[in-house]
Image (cartoon, coloured by chain):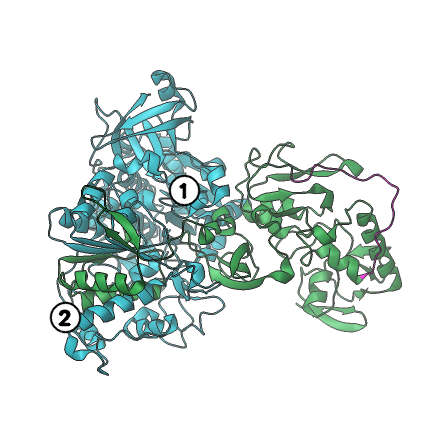
Chain colours: A cyan, B green
C-alpha cells in the first residue's frame, strides 16, 4: 500500500476493485464500512456482488478480465470531462501525452460493450472518483491474477496519477497483500530476481555487496518463479526441491500437473505443520513450529514490520524453520567443505545464528529500507518501511515528494482478452477466490472445528437464470469441468455472480478447484490467470 | 481553547468536546462505568458514572456530559455513592449469582463495580429473566442473556467497529432484551463471527465459546503477537495456560486493528494444538515387502537432516529450487534465500506471492 491502513479514515472516495475486502482483509473491510458510516463514498467494481457492494454508493459488475478496458474508459471520461489534476500531471508525472493518445479508442460506448457496464454507470464512477477527493484505490488478486495482471496494475496507477490521488493523505494506490507475510517474504529477498529490499541479483553492485556480506561467489542469473520451477521439475532440469509451508499441490493452477512435476523430482523435502497434499509427495518431511512457537517479525500490507512472539514451546519435536535451515546449511557445508569444519571462519559456511533477533540485525545491515529496524524499536507499534536509519520514524505514506523513479510515469496499456474465454464447449467463466472462514488450502482453518462448521464444503456460486436453464436447484450437485480437469460440488444459486459466471474457492481437497484453473501467466509478473478460465457446468 | 473546570476541588483543563468522564480520567480521577467504552459512542444508559455538578439539577451521567467553562464537578459525594449502589443493586436483582462458575470472573466489569461498592447480592422476590443459556447455535459466541445488563456495548461494537448491525434492543421496560436481527439466530442476522460483541461485553453475557471452561482471566499468561492469516497484520494477545493457547483476546493497544479482529484471527487458533500436527521428522521408505507402497517412517532429526543434506549437496546449482513461505517470518525467509543463494549457489527461490 502507498498509504497506511489508518489513512482510510481520511478518504472521501474509496474505489475497491478486485478485492473482496470484508472476506479477505476483514479488518480493513471494517475500516471501509466505518468510512462509509461517516459519509465517505464507496465505489465497488467486481464481477461478483460482494458484501461491500451492498453498502456501495456505486456498484458496477465488469465482465471478468476486462479491468484495463474499464480503467482506461474511466480515464477517457475523466480527461474529456476535464476532471484530471493538471497541476499534479505537470509537476509530478511524465509520458502523459503519449498515454493520452492511447485512451482515445476507449470511448464509453466501446468500454461498455467490452465490460458490459452501462455507459451512465461509467460516467458516475469516473465523476465520483475524480471529483470527490481525496480518493484511494484498493485492489487485490482480482486485479493481479490475470495474464494482464501487470498491465492491470499500471492502469490503476495511471488513474491515480491522472487525478493526483497519490502521495497525500486519503489518496493512494493500495494493493492489499494476501498472506500475513507475503510483503515481508518479498522484502527479504525470497524472490528469484531480488536480494533483500528489491536489490537485483543481476546488478553487479548489489551482487558484489552480498558476496562481501556473505563471503561467497553468487550467481548473477535470476532464478525461477514457482510456476517455472514446477515446469523445470517436470522437464528434469530441477532435480531437488525444498518446499517450506506451502501446499502447492492444492494452491497452484492445474493441480494435476503440479503433482506430476513434484513426482518427477529426485528428492523433495517439505517443512510443514501438517501432512498436506504436498507433504505426502515428499521424501522427507520436517515438522515445523507454528507462529505461536517462535520469535520473529511479519511485515503487513502497509509495510509495517511487527513482532511475532513465542507464546508456547514447540509442539513435540518441532523446530522453527530458521533453525532447520541452519541445521541443513551446516551439514551441507561439512559435506562440501570438510576442511572447514570446526574452523572459526565467518563466511557463509557457518550458520550459527542464536536468535531471530540476530538474523534481523543482519537483514538491517544489508537492506536499506530495513536499516533502522530493531526489535526494541518495533516492540509496541512496528515501523513502516522505508526506515533508512535508527532515528527514522518510518514512512506511512509513500511518494509524497517524488516517486522512486523520480516522476510518475503514465504507462499506455491496452485491453487484451483473457487467455481462455468461454466458448461453445466450455460456456461459463470460472473465477476463484476464498471465503471468510477459511484460508487457502485449509491446512490450518480446516483444523478449527467452528470454522469448519461455518463452511464445511465447497459451494459453486451460480446465477439463478443459469441455474434455471440447467434445471439446478440450490444445493444440487454440479459437475464443473475444464480442459484440464473436473470437480463435483454443490450449487449455491445466487445473483452474487453475473450471468455465465461461476465462482469457486480453492479451499477443499475433495473439490479441487485448481484442477480446473489455467496456468497461463502474465509474461512479466509470472502470475497465473486464476481469475478467469472457461468451464462447463452440468447438473450431476 | 482549553476549558477550565474543577473536579473534586482540583482545577483541571480539558479540551472542547471532551466529556466530564474523559476529562476526569485524563486527570487520574476514577469514575466507574459499565455501558461506557472509549471506542464506542456514549449512550448514558447505565448511570453508574453519575456525578454532581453545581447548578445542575439531580445527578448527571458524566459519560455524555460535555465539559463547559467554570463547571464544578464532584465525583464521589455520598449522594453519588448512594446512586451508584442503587444502580448496582437494581442490576443484581436480575443477575445470576454465579460468579464462581462464570467465564467472565476476574474480567467482569459488573463484578468489579459491585466489589468496589460492596453491594450484597440480596434475596430478591421480584421477577427475574430466565433465558435459555447458550441458546444460539453459532460456533464461536456463547450467549447467556441472563447476565446481560443492557449496556448495549455489543450493539454499538457490532455497528461501530464491525459495521454489521447484527445486534439490537427489542421490547420495552422489563421485557427489554438484546436480539440478533429480528430475534433470530446470530448467523441468520448476518453475523460474521468476529467476536467483537463478546470482546466488548462487560459481563458474562457474551463470551468466547471455544474457550469456555478453559480458564479465566487470572489463569492466563498473555503474549502479544501478530496474526498469521491475512496481510492486515492485526495484533492480539494469546492467552496461554499450562503451555497451551486457549484463547485469543483483542486489545486497544493493537495499533493496526485496536479491538477489531476477524473470525480467523480471534477464533482460528485451534490448529496449533491439533492432534494432526507433525511432531517428528518423517522419512519415506520402501514398503516392507516388494510392491508395497512407500510409507513414512518417523526418524530422529539427525537422521532426517543428514539425509536432506546429503541429497541436496548432490544438486547444488540450478538443479535445486526452494519454495519459501509467506507464512514464515522475515528472519526465516531471509535465511531461506541466503541458503539458496550462498549454500546451494542458485537464485531459484520464490514463494507464493502470486497465489
Q: Which residues are drawn in magenta?
A: B117-134
Judging from the image, mark 1 belongs to the subunit labelled A
Residue at screen point 11% across, 52% down: A237
**Is any part of residue A402 visible from this angle?**
no
Where is residue B209 shown, x and y percent of the image? 59, 46
Left/right of residue B138 with respect to residue A357 in the rendered view: right
Locate the C terminus of chain A and report the quarter of the image it occupies: top left
Where is residue B10 shown, x and y percent of the image? 78, 73
Locate the N terminus of chain A and report the quarter of the image it occupies: bottom left
Nearer to us in this view, B326 or A159: B326
- Majority SS type along the magenta span: loop
* Residue A210: quadrant of the picture: bottom left
Query: For residue A204, which numbered disc appears in the image?
Result: 2
Q: Earlier in the sequence, mark 1 or mark 2?
A: 1
Task: Confirm whether the magenta stretch covers residue B118.
Answer: yes
Nearer to us in this view, A373 or A69: A373
Judging from the image, mark 2 belongs to the subunit labelled A
| Residue under pointer 1 | A20
Nearer to us in this view, A172 or B121: B121
In this rendering, is residue A362 above or below A509? Answer: below
Amino acid at each position: 500500500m502507498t498509504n497506511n491502513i489508518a489513512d482510510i479514515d481520511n478518504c472521501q472516495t474509496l474505489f475497491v476493485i478486485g478485492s473482496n475486502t470484508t472476506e479477505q482483509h476483514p479488518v480493513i473491510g471494517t475500516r471501509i464500512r466505518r468510512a462509509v458510516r461517516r459519509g465517505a463514498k464507496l465505489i465497488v467494481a467486481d464481477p461478483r456482488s460482494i458484501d461491500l457492494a451492498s453498502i456501495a454508493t456505486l456498484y458496477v459488475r465488469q465482465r471478468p478480465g476486462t479491468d484495463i478496458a474499464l480503467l482506461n474508459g474511466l480515464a477517457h471520461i475523466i480527461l474529456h470531462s476535464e476532471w484530471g489534476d493538471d497541476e499534479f500531471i505537470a509537476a509530478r508525472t511524465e509520458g502523459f501525452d503519449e498515454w493520452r493518445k492511447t485512451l482515445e479508442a476507449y470511448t464509453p460506448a466501446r468500454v461498455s460493450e467490452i465490460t458490459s457496464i452501462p455507459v451512465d454507470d461509467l460516467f458516475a464512477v469516473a465523476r465520483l472518483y475524480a471529483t470527490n477527493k481525496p480518493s484511494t484505490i484498493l485492489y487485490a488478486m482480482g486485479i493481479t491474477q490475470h495474464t494482464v495482471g501487470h498491465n492491470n496494475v499500471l492502469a490503476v496507477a495511471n488513474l491515480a496519477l491522472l487525478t493526483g490521488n497519490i502521495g497525500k493523505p486519503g489518496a493512494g494506490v493500495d494493493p492489499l497483500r494476501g498472506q500475513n507475510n507475503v510483503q515481508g517474504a518479498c522484502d527479504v529477498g525470497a524472490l528469484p530476481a531480488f536480494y533483500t529490499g528489491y536489490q537485483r541479483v543481476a546488478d553487479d553492485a548489489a551482487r558484489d555487496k552480498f558476496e562481501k556480506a556473505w563471503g561467497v561467489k553468487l550467481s548473477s542469473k535470476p532464478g525461477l518463479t514457482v510456476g517455472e520451477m514446477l515446469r523445470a521439475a517436470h522437464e528434469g532440469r530441477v532435480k531437488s526441491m525444498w518446499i517450506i509451508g506451502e501446499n502447492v499441490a492444492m494452491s497452484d493452477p492445474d493441480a494435476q500437473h503440479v503433482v506430476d512435476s513434484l513426482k518427477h523430482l529426485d528428492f523433495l523435502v517439505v517443512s510443514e505443520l501438517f501432512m498436506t497434499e504436498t507433504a505426502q509427495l515428499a521424501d522427507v518431511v520436517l515438522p515445523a513450529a507454528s507462529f505461536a512457537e517462535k520469535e520473529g517479525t511479519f511485515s503487513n500490507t502497509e509495510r509495517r514490520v511487527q513482532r511475532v512472539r513465542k507464546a508456547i514451546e514447540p509442539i513435540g519435536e518441532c523446530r522453527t524453520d530458521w533453525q532447520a535451515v541452519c541445521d541443513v546449511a551446516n551439514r551441507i557445508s561439512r559435506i562440501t567443505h570438510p576442511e572447514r569444519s570446526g574452523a572459526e571462519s565467518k563466511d557463509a559456511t557457518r550458520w550459527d545464528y542464536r536468535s531471530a533477533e540476530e538474523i534481523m540485525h543482519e537483514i538491517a545491515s544489508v537492506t536499506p529500507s530495513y536499516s533502522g529496524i530493531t526489535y526494541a524499536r518495533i516492540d509496541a507499534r512496528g515501523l513502516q518501511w522505508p526506515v533508512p536509519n535508527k532515528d527514522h520514524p518510518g514512512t506511512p505514506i509513500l511518494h509524497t515528494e517524488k516517486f522512486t523513479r523520480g516522476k510518475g510515469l503514465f504507462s499506455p496499456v491496452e485491453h487484451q482478452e483473457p487467455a481462455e474465454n468461454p466458448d461453445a464447449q466450455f460456456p461459463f467463466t470460472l473465477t476463484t477466490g476464498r471465503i471468510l472462514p477459511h484460508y487457502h488450502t485449509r491446512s490450518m482453518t480446516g483444523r478449527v472445528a467452528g470454522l469448519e462448521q461455518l463452511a464445511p464444503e465447497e459451494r459453486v456460486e451460480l446465477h439463478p437464470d443459469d441455474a434455471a436453464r440447467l434445471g439446478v436447484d440450490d444445493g444440487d450437485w454440479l459437475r464443473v469441468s475444464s480442459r484440464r480437469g473436473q470437480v463435483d460440488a454443490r450449487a449455491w444459486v445466487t445473483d452474487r455472480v453475473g450471468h455465465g459466471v461461476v465462482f469457486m474457492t480453492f479451499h477443499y481437497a475433495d473439490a479441487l478447484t485448481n484442477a480446473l484453473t489455467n496456468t497461463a501467466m502474465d509474461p512479466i509478473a509470472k502470475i497465473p490467470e486464476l481469475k478467469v478460465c472457461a468451464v462447463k457446468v452440468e447438473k450431476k | 481553547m482549553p476549558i477550565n473546570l474543577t473536579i473534586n476541588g482540583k482545577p483541571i483543563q480539558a479540551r472542547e468536546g471532551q466529556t466530564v468522564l474523559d476529562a476526569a480520567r485524563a486527570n487520574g480521577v476514577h469514575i466507574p462505568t459499565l455501558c461506557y467504552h472509549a471506542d464506542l459512542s456514549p449512550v448514558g444508559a447505565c448511570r453508574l458514572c453519575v456525578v454532581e455538578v453545581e447548578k445542575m439539577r439531580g445527578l448527571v451521567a458524566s459519560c455524555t456530559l460535555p465539559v463547559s467553562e467554570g463547571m464544578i464537578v464532584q465525583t464521589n459525594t455520598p449522594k453519588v455513592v448512594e446512586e451508584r449502589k442503587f444502580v448496582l443493586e437494581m442490576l443484581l436483582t436480575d443477575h445470576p449469582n454465579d460468579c464462581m462458575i462464570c467465564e467472565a470472573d476476574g474480567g467482569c466489569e459488573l463484578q468489579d463495580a459491585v466489589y468496589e461498592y460492596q453491594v450484597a447480592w440480596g434475596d430478591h422476590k421480584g421477577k427475574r429473566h430466565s433465558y435459555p443459556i447458550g441458546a444460539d447455535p453459532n460456533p464461536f459466541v456463547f450467549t447467556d442473556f441472563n447476565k446481560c445488563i443492557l449496556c448495549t456495548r455489543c450493539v454499538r461494537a457490532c455497528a461501530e467497529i464491525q459495521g454489521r448491525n447484527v445486534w439490537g434492543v427489542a421490547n420495552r421496560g422489563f421485557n427489554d432484551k438484546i436480539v440478533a436481527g429480528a430475534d433470530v439466530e446470530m448467523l441468520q442476522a448476518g453475523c460474521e463471527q468476529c467476536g467483537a460483541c463478546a470482546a466488548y461485553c462487560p459481563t458474562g453475557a457474551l463470551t468466547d465459546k471455544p474457550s469456555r471452561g478453559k480458564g479465566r482471566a487470572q489463569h492466563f499468561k498473555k503474549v502479544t503477537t501478530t496474526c498469521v492469516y491475512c496481510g492486515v497484520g492485526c495484533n492480539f494477545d494469546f492467552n496461554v495456560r499450562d503451555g497451551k493457547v486457549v484463547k485469543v483476546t483483542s486489545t486497544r493497544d493493537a495499533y493496526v486493528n485496536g479491538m477489531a479482529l476477524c473470525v480467523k484471527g480471534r477464533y482460528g487458533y485451534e490448529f496449533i494444538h491439533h492432534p494432526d500436527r507433525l511432531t517428528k521428522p518423517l522419512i519415506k521408505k520402501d514398503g516392507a515387502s516388494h510392491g508395497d507402497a512407500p510409507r513414512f517412517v518417523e526418524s530422529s532429526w539427525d537422521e532426517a537432516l543428514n539425509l536432506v543434506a546429503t541429497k541436496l549437496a548432490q544438486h547444488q546449482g540450478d538443479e535445486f529450487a526452494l519454495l519459501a513461505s509467506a507464512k514464515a517470518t522475515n528472519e526465516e525467509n531471509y535465511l531461506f534465500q541466503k541458503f539458496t543463494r550462498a549454500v546451494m549457489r542458485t537464485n531459484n527461490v520464490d514463494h507464493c506471492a502470486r497465489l
